Image (cartoon, rainbow, N blue to C red):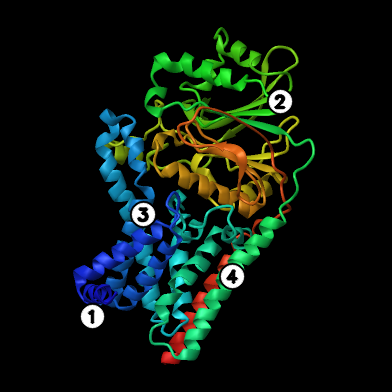
Amino acid sequence: MSRLTDLYSRAETHPAGRGVLVLCAGLAAALAHPPFGVLPGLLGFALLLRLVDQAAPERPLASAFFQGWLAGLGYFALSVWWVTEAFLVDAAAHGWMAPFALVFLAGGLALFWGAGAWLYRLSGTQGPFRVLVFAGALALAEFVRGHIFTGFPWNLPGEAWRAGGAPSQAAALVGAYGLTWITVALAASPAVLPGLARRQTLAVGGAAAVVLVGLYGGGAWRLATAPAPREAAPVVRIVQADVDQKEKWRPENLDLIFDDYVRLSRLPAPQTPDVVIWPEGALPAVIDDLLAPGEPYPVALAEAFAPGQVLMLGANRVGVSEAGGLEYFNTLVAFERLETPGLEVVGIYDKHRLVPFGEYLPLGEIMTGLGLRSLVNMPADFTAGPPPQPLVLPSLPPVQPLICYEALFPRFTGQGAARGGIRAEWILNVSNDAWFGATSGPWQHLNLSSYRAIEEGLPLVRSTPTGVSGVIDSRGRLQAGAWMSQGRRGVIDAPLPPPDGPTPFSRLGNLPFAIMLLISGAMAVMSWFRRR
């Protein structure tokens, strides 16, 4: 043990050693997220705070920024490495972009951590309360990351807790950003203990213990008070056909894929499903072409369902712009099987929040000139649909669709309810995680989307072509026997869990988080007055 302590001390006093330590701090924090679940890794925030406090005195702000950026580089490199898989689906066209995508994505996201560390060091806060200023600076940086340039709030520190576990329930009160503030403050608190008087040590340690007990105790209480299953709940069928993304867009495979989805949709069940769900971009074709007069697909599709059943499938759709040109949409289409043979479109949701470089190319002409293009299998980039609001479908409770990474964004469902004037009773997240193969990405996506169920108090149904698919209750828990892992083919039949009443977060939004930031700011101001 003494040798390890000595080795750490030597590393801490050497510039290169500090760089290795701060990189390890970010890697450790990332290990807390699925599929690793190493929660002690969150102590990487304590190491980061300690090293930022020791930033080079001759240039403390620049040093703090670099250390925050380096920690963020480790954190995001481990968190988003799976993005390289998407570029390898068509390796001949996009493979060369894979290493650049990871370097620029991780390095770009790490800038926000650098800014958080810089802001913290700029405050000059001293004493034990500096842990709250550090938490506020980093949480504010994460909030900006989740909103600027359409936002990419992947793996917020507050979402490291397993969704459905006791600590994750705090998101129903303060949201993912508020839980990020709490998580960073709690995890970083050991860094302020050295050098404190005994009374201060007991106060800081006692406060951290109270918060930790509150997270687990309050979360356990909320889990124990979940709404009871309702009678005559709609039965949901999720179809997971396990279609590999590399094989999906081969023209000769269209009929095989279509037949497979139809065959799985028709599997017998003790109770006929009320709604059948196919994932995002289930079929390798534009839905308008498939359903055109004279095509065999509309008849086969109608025959696969019983009268009154609803089919909700992710599809690519073509529209005409005001200028008369063609527009392409990533869409969720809802059909109802009529009493007479045929399907009627009863709802359409066009994806509103598109993935940069995946579904559209920012600064399109410039990027195209550099040889870049988006990954969509369409003649042009997708067009964003209108802001979301719930769909009201026949014989089903109102539903808020979220396509793919829209499920990363807190408040998306609540804002949709405000626009539509009606609160959804469940959330449907269709996603094409087949882009990312058997990596950590789909497991993280499952965990992150489950936080939207906790925040809104609504069950969530998640449908992907290759996993992980499942039914999640209003507490963020995967229902036993109602989920399917990666690389499996089949269907999930399960009753739709009941919604809970509006949560504090659904009513207050990010107001609790704003109060936390004000507390952090007040601590910084108080420290400044003490120094004066």
In this rendering, which labeled residue sits more in front, label 4 or label 1?
Answer: 4
Q: Amino acid at mark 3?
A: Phe
Residue wearing tag 2: 270
Quarter of the rendering containing residue 513: bottom right
Between discs 1 and 3, the one toward the N terminus: 1
Residue 38: give x, y in percent of width and height: 43, 58
Q: Residues within 10 Å of mark 3 (few under 14, many from 20)?
A: many
Residue wearing tag 1: 58
Q: CA distance from mark 1 to mark 2?
A: 73 Å
Q: Amino acid at mark 4?
A: Val
* 324 relative to 16, above or below: above
Residue 128 visible to an observer of this rendering: yes
Q: Amino acid at mark 1?
A: Glu
Residue 17: give x, y in percent of width and height: 22, 69
Q: Amino acid at mark 2?
A: Pro
- Residue at 60% of width from left, 22% of height from top? 265
Give the quarter of the figure containing the N terminus.
bottom left
Image-based side of 4 in relation to 308, left or right: left
Q: Which mark is residue 115?
A: none
Circle 1 sits in a helix, a strand or a loop, which is it? loop
Residue 282: give x, y in percent of width and height: 51, 26
Residue 363 visible to an observer of this rendering: no
Residue wearing tag 3: 76
Quarter of the rendering containing residue 24: bottom left
In this rendering, which labeled residue sits more in front, label 3 or label 2?
Answer: 2
Between discs 2 and 4, the one toward the N terminus: 4
